[in-house]
Image (cartoon, grey):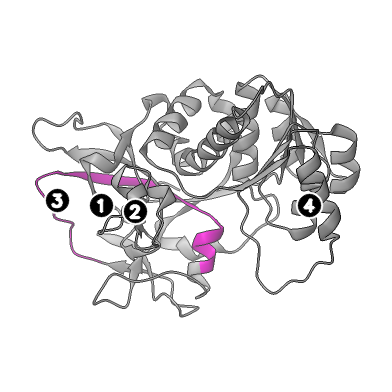
Amino acid sequence: MQAMTVRPGSAGTLRVDDMGEPRPGPDDLLVDGLAVGVCGTDKEIVSGRYGWAPAGRDRLVIGHESLGRVTEAPPGSSFHTGDLVVGVVRRPDPVPCRACARGEFDMCRNGRYTERGIKEIDGYGAQRWCVEADYAITIDERLADVGVLMEPTTVVAKAWEQVWRIGQRAYFEPERALITGAGPVGLLAAMLSVQRGLDTHVLDRVTDGPKPGIVAALGATYHHDDIDTVAARLQPDVVIEATGAGPVVFGAIANTSTYGIVCLTGVSAAGRGLKIDAGAVNRELVLENDAVVGSVNANLRHYRQAADALARADKDWLAGLITRRVPLHRAADAFTAEPGDVKVIVTLDGSD
């Protein structure tokens, strides 16, 4: 069996290794891997800036955006041979903290959680893998070609849940949403916005390539002007921020409607300075009852929400997000950006 591995903390160590076959425990599924998605976190791990190997080892199997097919399932479980599944990324911390003890492990309070393919547990970037039945989610068979989009969809399912919960502090009937960033997370956030019936707008800096067409096919409006111009004109009720770029973040915060909500999902690079009028930002947040919230990761509830959202989506539209499929033996190619990339995946089943 082959798998993508790296030595966390060391750049240039990505390789495809021969490994022993996984041995499922009594409560585990054995799964044939079909594909894994490549995202910014994976690229940070490969570049040596992030990631932790399992205890007692120096290499980590990467890949947290999973898709596979069950080959063995525990007796009495709800899973069957042939089921299309994804594996949940995060596991609760062992203490557990009060959030993890209640199943809200995406909100872990002490940082002792672990994550498949990221933090101390091998990931799903292997031809075969095991996953606890309690941390696997079945998805619609019609999504076999695009189900690898499940994990990034969970991220925005949680983001939208956070927005709705905050909005319910008072009267809340949003009409217009602005999504900043037209990468996979931004586009999937826009998809959920459209499914909620909102007038949806997407802002990205590119003017060519597939992104404008993908947004148009969704029934949303694409913009490429600066954030202050676009947001000031739109006055969105909700902003899902998916770039992590400082000027975009603060431009969005400064230009929502009254009682606006900005949900930050993009992770900013450290060390970049930005001069802002902190007093003006504070004044607007207070006087307009605005809210800004950060959101990361997902729990089991969000995986189920994502599975429902993908099942309702246009499959052809989802397929348009996957712009490059790289076979496992050429996995390194997936970590080098090419013009027109939106979502790049590594196929694990021998398909090109």
Circles 2, 1 touching at the beta carbon (< 8 Å) = yes
In the picture, measured across the screen, residue 284 lies left or right of residue 35, that is: right
Residue 32 covered by magenta stretch: yes
**SS under mark 1:** strand
User: What residue sits 15% from the left and 37% below the top?
Assistant: 73
Residue 169 coordinates in the image, percent (x, y):
60, 30
Compared to residue 95, the image places residue 100 above or below, namely above
Q: Which amino acid does label 3 sit on?
A: Pro
Range shown magenta: 19-44
User: What residue sits 37% from the left and 64% below the top?
Assistant: 119
Compared to residue 276, the image places residue 222 above or below, namely above
The disc label shown at residue 124, or none: 2
In the picture, measured across the screen, residue 228 lies left or right of residue 348, that is: right
User: What residue sits 21% from the left and 40% below the top?
Assistant: 133
Residue 206 coordinates in the image, percent (x, y):
80, 49
Residue identified by numbered label 1? 129
User: Label 4, label 3: how many angstroms apart (C-alpha)?
Assistant: 53 Å
Mark 1 neighbour density, 10 Å: few (under 14) some (14–19) many (20 or more)? many
Earlier in the chain: of badge 4 and badge 2, it is: 2
Earlier in the chain: of badge 4 and badge 3, it is: 3
Q: What residue type is labelled 4?
A: Asn
